[in-house]
Image (cartoon, rainbow, N blue to C red):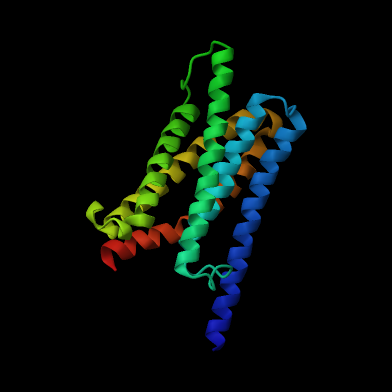
């Protein structure tokens, strides 16, 4: 009983720290944007929406795979799936609008599209997110259409694509921080990168464990 209590307290502390890291990272980025850009600036909304989509929504969506999460231990599997789908839907919408705004800005300025590592990786992540979302919808409804195949296969493909999209999205976000360095300074950018790396590593524990259990469990 004592061991269980210590474990629960430790997990609760770790989960609380994770939420604080997410909040600090997102709020710091948004603070720099609001401080230095007008809300009528299209680029500002690109940064805001993509940061929320990847840095907040996708991170929280992946957290639902961690069955030991102290905040979600009373949530049943069906509810987790519903919340996961809703959060990831919000991520897709946020990223789609954010990328569309940037493309429109490039068109208006007659600039070349997708020439930087940031833009190329970000586009790839967005495509994988959409594919993963479609497969996720199929996975959630596969039992209603038995002819579509086996649910475990859809689940592992959805998980693999989703994790890959998240990792690429985070890399694109990291490249995007270079554009904020002139605002935050070198030390500020390093701090943001550290926050990003820490909470990304923790948010991936659940999906990695799910992959391991699928193949070796």
Q: Residue furthest right?
A: 35
Between residues 171 and 114, which one lies in front from this camera angle? Answer: 114
Residue 85 point in image, percent of width and height: 48, 53
Residue 46, percent from left and from top:
60, 31
Q: Is residue 32 above or below residue 14?
A: above
Give me the residue at 58% from left, 73% from top: 10
For the point 73% across and 39% down, the residue is 31
Q: Position of residue 92 (x, y in %)?
A: 50, 41
Q: Is residue 137 above or below residue 74?
A: above
Spot the residue most to the bottom.
1
Residue at left 70%, top 30%? 183
Viewport quadrant of the C terminus: bottom left
Residue 210 vs residue 98: left or right?
Answer: left
Among the 4 quarters of the image, the one containing residue 55: top right
Residue projecting furthest to the top: 110
Residue 165 appears in the rendering: yes
Residue in the foreground of this view, choosing between 3 and 44: 44
Residue 110 in which image quadrant: top right
Quadrant containing the N terminus is: bottom right
- Nearest the viewer among 185 and 175 is 175
Pinpoint residue 86: horizontal percent, then vertical percent.
Answer: 52, 52
Q: Is residue 70 above or below residue 144?
A: below
Image position of 4 (left or right of 148): right
Residue 201 in view in this figure: no
Q: Residue at x 69, y 39 (%)?
A: 30
């Amino acid at each position: 009983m004592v061991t269980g209590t210590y474990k629960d307290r430790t997990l609760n502390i770790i989960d609380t720290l994770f939420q604080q890291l997410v909040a600090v990272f997102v709020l710091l980025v948004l603070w720099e944007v609001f401080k230095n850009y007008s809300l009528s600036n299209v680029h500002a909304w690109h940064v805001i929406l993509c940061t929320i989509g990847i840095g907040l929504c996708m991170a929280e969506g992946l957290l639902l795979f961690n069955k030991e999460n102290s905040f979600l231990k009373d949530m049943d599997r069906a509810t987790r799936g519903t919340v996961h789908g809703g959060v990831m839907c919000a991520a897709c919408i946020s990223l789609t609008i954010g990328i569309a705004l940037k493309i429109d800005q490039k068109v208006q300025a007659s600039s070349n599209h997708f020439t930087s590592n940031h833009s190329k990786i970000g586009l790839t992540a967005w495509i994988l997110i959409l594919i993963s979302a479609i497969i996720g919808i199929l996975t959630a409804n596969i039992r209603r259409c038995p002819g579509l195949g086996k649910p475990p296969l859809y689940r592992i493909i959805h998980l693999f694509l989703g994790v890959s999209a998240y990792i690429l999205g985070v890399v694109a976000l990291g490249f995007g921080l270079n554009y904020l360095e002139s605002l935050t300074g070198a030390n500020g950018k390093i701090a943001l990168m550290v926050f990003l790396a820490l909470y990304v590593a923790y948010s991936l524990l659940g999906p990695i464990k799910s992959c391991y259990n699928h193949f070796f469990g």
